[in-house]
Image (tube, grey):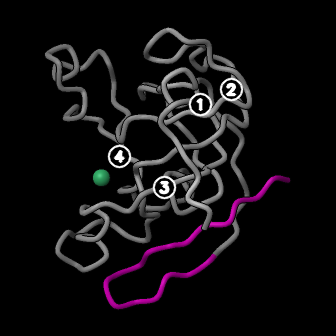
Amino acid sequence: MKTSKLAVFHANGLPFTYETVPVPALREGEILIRNEYVTLCRSDLNTFSGKRMEKTPTILGHEIVGVIDDLAPGAPTRDCRGTELRRGDRVTWAIYASNPDSWMARNGIPQKGPDLFKYGHEQINPASTLHGGLAEYCVLRRHRPVTGRRVLRLRTFRLGI
Ligand SMILES: [Zn+2]
């Protein structure tokens, strides 16, 4: 069974815990990503410092670049620019997943949809464990915009750390 290491954030002032969890079987339309890079931005720092309250435990980091490890049946075959998505492609994705048929999405603001799911901000629970950057793997849900290799080829670089 494939497993993933992750750094779990519990609350301001508490140490991260480092855990290993099973990588769940993908559901229809999902993509498994092996995370390569993640930034920790101001909203992560606000959560870390207690200025922003998130349901915890959680996995910080929502600006992520990774490689497609697996595509479930029904997963998108093209990214948001029409480039084919294949196993091994380096991709990034939007912070959110939400229903494209919601009123908010149809009016141009899917990131405010009623069923909004935000990577790097969700509570770890038995049904959803891998949804942040400070982990080896991330499961991309249905209805999240992905940008593929054609865009990232010129814009990513390794920090060497
Ligand atoms: Zn951010």
Q: Say which residue label 4 marks.
A: 118
Image position of 123 with respect to 110: above or below: below
Q: CA distance from mark 2 to mark 4?
A: 20 Å
**Given contact means CB atoms under 8 Å apart, are the residues at marks 1 and 3 in contact?**
no
Distance CA(mark 3)–CA(mark 2) = 23 Å
Residues in magenta, as a range = 1-18
Q: Contact, CB < 8 Å: mark 2 with mark 4?
A: no
Q: Secondary structure at mark 2?
A: loop
Q: Is residue 11 left or right of residue 75?
A: left
Q: Residue at x 44, y 71 (%)?
A: 57
> Between 153 and 120, which is closer to the camera in this rendering?
153
- Badge 3: residue crowd in 10 Å (few <14, some 14–19, many ≥20): some
Label 1's element?
loop
Q: What residue sits 54% from the left and 53% below the top?
A: 37
Q: Is residue 25 above or below residue 12?
A: above
Q: Residue at x 72, y 41 (%)?
A: 25
- x and y, in percent, of residue 98 in the image: 33, 30
Labels 1 and 3: the sequence-earlier one: 1
Q: Which residue is mark 1?
A: 30
Within 10 Å of disc 1 (Cα), the crowding (few <14, some 14-19, many 20+) is many
Q: Is residue 11 left or right of residue 34?
A: left
Say which amino acid is labelled 4.
Lys
Q: Residue at x 61, y 32 (%)?
A: 31
| Upstream in sequence: badge 1 or badge 2 | 1
Secondary structure type for disc 3? strand
Residue placed under numbered mark 2 in the picture: 72
Q: Which mark is residue 95?
A: none
Mark 4 near mark 1, Cβ–Cβ under 8 Å? no
Label 2 sits on what residue type?
Ala
Residue kind at label 1, given as amino acid type: Glu
